[in-house]
Amino acid sequence: MTDRPLRIAVLGTADIARRRVLPAMAADPDVELTAVASRDGGRAKEVADQFGCAAVESYDAVLARDDVDAVYVPLPISLHAEWAGRALRAGKHVLAEKPLTADRATTEALLALARASGLVLMENVMFVHHPQHSVVRELVSSGAIGQLRAFSAAFAIPALPAGNIRHRPELGGGALLDVGYYPVRAALYFLGAGLEIVGAALEHGDGSAVETSGAVLVRSPAGVLGQLAFGMEHAYRSAYELWGSEGRIRVEPAFTPAADHKPEVWITDAHGPRELTLAPHDQVAATVRAFVRAVRSGAVESPDAGECLEQASLLDAVRARATHQRTARSVPTSVSTSTSTSPSDEEGTDRDRD
């Protein structure tokens, strides 16, 4: 496949596909867009005409085409597992929007299917392909801020219309999977594997069927604490900060910079504050290139499989922890008339806090 472009078809016409991913694919000389599929034929034609490829009204028809090596899946989260799985069984490599699925078990099953099929299944996490974050990680590793003590990250967007799919639980909507994904993945990126969710809260806005905001407390195996916040009814924010024994580093905006944005890394250390300005970088184009490289390498393991599975576990743990804490708050506390406290009473109180 190294002597011709990777032929990619798109299942769906989501906003992220039209605005960012399809233009990046069309501009990449190693990619040939072959088809855009939508259950709305007019919609498929409208998007396909913009990129000079075929319009198809059936996702299954795309998977049956001989001129398709891989598919990009920007469908709602609840449809990722079905159509990524169908694509893999049809012998197509898959780039799927994040999160790959809504839970660890399904994510693990899809990754196993890709491995057994000898195909690449890659989650479309674009910010990790921006070099600004590797620069920050190298600064921390070099001791620029001393020993890392704490991490914080936030990603939030303004309120969305009530009919937006992010407000529909049956489509996988909700702040955790949509915007909470970013600070959780940033914690994994900077603090490493083995994170423990030690606290979590998910809040529903008035009349919402899904959570619209949340906060998470994580702890790394090294004892570094991370505070993560997210929401979809806030003033926009996209940022993270690493706080060490001798200084701190902040990046803002962090997760969705435009291709022409010059990243600024703010560093405060023993010498005072300074600003490091980096060259612009198109993280969308970089993600597309990473997918093409993975396919051409013939790798038997998807390039981000470990992180993808770890991320799925963390999101599951956040939801479980938030549910547990909400349930604990709703249980009435009995009042004892005893003046003494027994060991069993103390153990019960400790369990209620967990």
Image: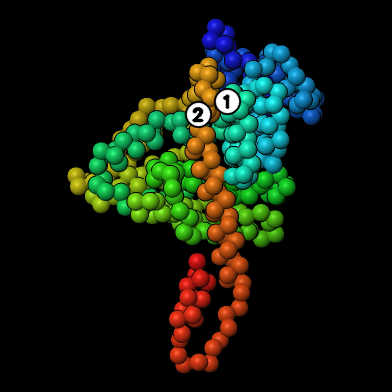
Looking at the image, tell me whether mark 1 or mark 2 is earlier in sequence order.
Answer: 1
What number is the disc on residue 290? none
Q: Identify residue for label 2.
A: 303
Q: Is residue 265 left or right of residue 69?
A: left
Q: Position of residue 142 (x, y in %)?
A: 25, 38
In percent of the image, x 52 and y 72: which residue is there?
352
Can see residue 43? no
**30 vs 121: above or below:** above
Q: Is residue 58 left or right of residue 279?
A: right
Asked if labels 2 and 1 touch by Cβ distance under 8 angstroms, the answer is: yes
Looking at the image, the residue that sits furthest to the left is 271
* Nearest to the observer: residue 186 or residue 132: 186
Give the CA separation, mark 1 to mark 2.
8 Å
In percent of the image, x 26 and y 45: which residue is there?
145
Can see residue 107? yes
Q: Position of residue 107 (x, y in %)?
A: 60, 39
**335 vs 204: above or below:** below
Q: Amino acid at mark 2?
A: Pro
In percent of the image, x 51 and y 22: which residue is there?
299
Q: Position of residue 275 (x, y in %)?
A: 29, 38
**227 vs 14: above or below:** below
In percent of the image, x 19 and y 44: which residue is there?
271
Callout 1 secondary element: loop
| Colour convention of the picture | rainbow
Q: Identify residue for label 1.
A: 120
Q: Is residue 177 left or right of residue 219?
A: right
* Nearest to the observer: residue 89 or residue 1: 89
Looking at the image, the residue that sits furthest to the top is 3
Callout 2 secondary element: loop
* Nearest to the observer: residue 261 or residue 183: 183
